[in-house]
Image (spheres, rainbow, N blue to C red):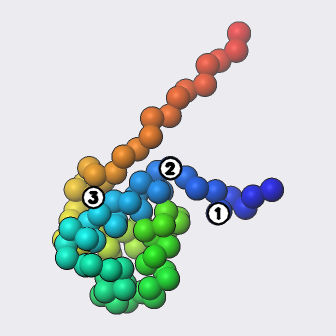
Amino acid sequence: MKKIDKIKIPELISIGDRLQDLRKEKGFKNYEHIAYDLGMSRSAYWRLESGENFSLKTLVKVCKILGVTLEEFFAGVAVPKVEKKKKKK
């Protein structure tokens, strides 16, 4: 069985992609520089962009460094459409 933490969740991948796009857009050419500004290790920040699960507190901190609001951040996140299961009769 796979551990629940190792399962790739599409929404988290999309959030990681958005973090990477914004980082580059704001002039951070590599993740080492933003990791330093955030006071995190390079590997910890890399996990954020890789779609690992992280806290909202961390997201707020990253958004502040990037100069974007949470609303602006999530406006660029592609959320996959979830199909509802049909009830059996």
Q: Residues within 10 Å of mark 3 (few under 14, many from 20)?
A: some
Residue receiving disc 3: 73
Please name the residue that numbered disc 2 is placed on. 10
Residue 63 in the image, given as x and y percentages of width and height? 28, 69
SS class, disc 3: helix
The residue located at (65%, 18%) in the rendering is 87
The residue identified by callout 1 is 5
**How far across and down, in percent of the image, does residue 3 sit?**
73, 61
Q: Which residue is situated farthest in the right direction here?
A: 1
> The residue tagged with tag 2: helix, strand or loop?
helix
Disc on res. 14: none
Which residue is rendered at x = 47% and y = 57% of the image? 13
Report the residue at 29% width, 63% height from top: 21
Q: Position of residue 23 (x, y in %)?
A: 28, 71
Between the residue at mark 3 and the residue at mark 1, the CA separation in whole angstroms equals: 24 Å
Earlier along the polypeptide chain: callout 2 or callout 1? 1
Q: Residue at x 53, y 29 (%)?
A: 83
Reply above or below: 61 against 5. Answer: below
Q: Where does the N terminus fall, quadrant-wise?
A: bottom right
Q: Place residue 40 in its image quadrant.
A: bottom left
Q: Earlier in the sequence, mark 3 or mark 2?
A: 2
- Spatial CA distance of label 3 from label 2 is 16 Å
What is the secondary structure assignment of the residue under circle 1? helix
Number of numbered tags placed on the structure image: 3
- Residue 38 visible in image: no
- 3 and 2 marks in contact (CB < 8 Å): no
